[in-house]
Image: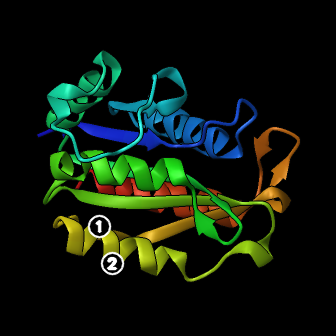
Amino acid sequence: MQKNILIIQTSLNKNSKTWIVCEKILEIWKKMWLSIEILDLRNYKLEMCDWRKIEEYNEDMNRIKSILEKLDRCILAYPIYNYSFSWVCKNFIDIFSHYINWKRCWIIQNSYSSRSFSDWFWELSKILSLHDKIPIVLPLIHTCNEDFNWNELVWEKSLEKIKELLFNINQ
């Protein structure tokens, strides 16, 4: 039975390397004849979490909720800024984590350099597993600028981990 799988892309940068990794996943996934979609938050008018009911947020926020209610599994892709996940990612979790409760989730993070990698993955894992019950599944994929040749992901280890992730996510 095919799963409804969604990549949640949380970088708002128009030249996002996080987006490039998501596109690579989509490209490889389609070669496997499977269906996956990307929820690109750059395409939505996002509001800040202030603990209103979801119905009180704008139309785009309610569209995101409708998309999330249908997913079986997800990949959360986010940039690392100043050694932490972005405010967009945290805001997304604060508003929408309830809608991915008990759904298996894989993590992709992208940073400026390999030295920017930190233990924030574990911090995010705690937030997801304690705030709501969102199980994080390995492998974690971490990319950085050194893994790209212009706007193409070229580092073989990242590509191997993406293939491993894609194999596991549909199981």
Residue closest to the eye, 117 or 30: 117
Pinpoint residue 45: horizontal percent, then vertical percent. 46, 23
Residue 72 vertical position relative to residue 114 in the rendered view, above or below? above
- Left or right, 142 with respect to 102, comes to right
Residue 102's quadrant in the figure?
bottom left
Residue in view at x 70 percent, y 39 percent: 16
Q: Quadrant of the C terminus?
A: bottom left
Quarter of the rendering occupied by the N terminus? top left
Front residue (pair 165, 115): 115
Q: Which residue is mark 1?
A: 128
Instruction: Give the crowd class for mark 1: few <14, some 14-19, many >=20 residues within 10 Å.
Output: many
**Label 1 sits on what residue type?**
Leu
Does the image show residue 91? yes
Residue 42 vertical placement versus 110 (above, below): above
Residue occupying image coordinates x 44% and y 80%: 122
Note whether residue 168 is visible.
no
Residue 20 x %, y %: 66, 39
33 lies left or right of 20: left
Report the Cα–Cα distance between label 2 and label 1: 5 Å
Residue at image mark 2: 126
